[in-house]
Amino acid sequence: MSSKRKTPLENPSLEGHHCTVDLRLEKLGMVPFFQALSNEQLRQVNKKFTANHYARGETIYRQGDSATILRVVVAGNVKLVAHTMEGEGVLLAMLQPGDFFGNPTADSKDVYNETAETQTDACILSIRLSDFREIMNGYSSVAMRVLDITTERLNESRQRIRHLSTLPVTKRIAHVLVTLGNKFGEKHPHGLLIQLPLSRKDLADMAGTSSATASRVMSRFQNDNLITSGRQWVAIKNKPELLRISAED
């Protein structure tokens, strides 16, 4: 069998896995708006969360559902996909343990602007927004950080729109690879392995291009020895050069 048909990705099963208190506290402590809390305060916050397990490929919520829950990834990976009027899916983000999703400032009339799907088996912590507001009222550091994060995400969205509308596709794909490498990359004999299932369509959606164009650019990067890849996986071999490509005028 060709090496390209073998995946170097870790795919730990969550069968028999439980979101233990220690694991829950560890991942909650990674959430930006909880980082200033003490261990005892985190324990009190943890009591308001419930844990749920999902199999790979399950839908956690759908675009248009009432936005009443805030969630935190404890184990596994989740992707957020927005659907256009034509029904096409656009990949917005990929999440790892310690990431939160859902709108922490949503009110009772708001809906989710995206669909959340598991990329692997996953354990997710959930809290009702009414309970989360109680936490913000009780801990001013949480409320202030939520405001900061809301502003940061708005700025990131604006930057992404600028990238999609002004940068050549080669630069966009190089930027996506570097961004994913920074977040999910692990040292591996293949290079900096992006440790999550990643299809050409995923890359194309994140770069705002077609799968065919993304495949051509990725083939060029592979021929230039900047990356190596196989079915659903990518490893970066020359990150400085990808950075140069993504940043060049």
Image (spheres, rainbow, N blue to C red):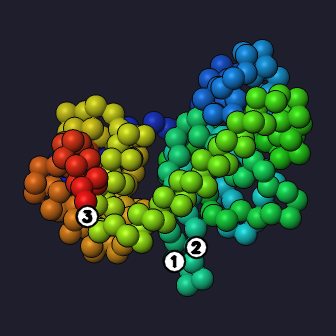
Does label 3 or label 2 sit earlier along the sequence? 2
**From the viewer's perspective, is the residue at label 1 or at label 3 nearer?**
3
Label 3 belongs to which residue?
170
Label 2 belongs to which residue?
83
Q: Is residue 214 above or below residue 48?
A: below
Instruction: Residue type at mark 1: give it.
Output: Glu
Q: Could you say which is closer to the camera, residue 190 or residue 142?
A: 142
Instruction: Residue type at mark 2: give it.
Output: His
Residue 226 horizontal/vertical position (percent): 17, 49
Q: Specify whether residue 211 is in view.
A: yes
Asked whether, in this view, residue 129 is left or right of residue 234, the answer is right
Within-10-Å neighbours for mark 2: few <14, some 14–19, many 20+: some
Residue at 73% in and 21% down: 37
Residue at 69% in and 59% down: 61
Give the structural element (helix, strand or loop) at label 1: loop
Does label 2 or label 1 sit earlier along the sequence? 2
The alpha-carbon separation of the residues under discs 3 and 2 comes to 24 Å
Q: Which mark is residue 88?
A: 1
Instruction: Residue type at mark 3: give it.
Output: Thr
Does label 1 or label 3 sit earlier along the sequence? 1
Within-10-Å neighbours for mark 3: few <14, some 14–19, many 20+: many
Q: Is residue 207 above or below residue 75?
A: below
Location of residue 231 by image quarter: bottom left
The alpha-carbon separation of the residues under discs 2 and 1 comes to 5 Å
Say if mark 3 contacts mark 2, CB within 8 Å: no
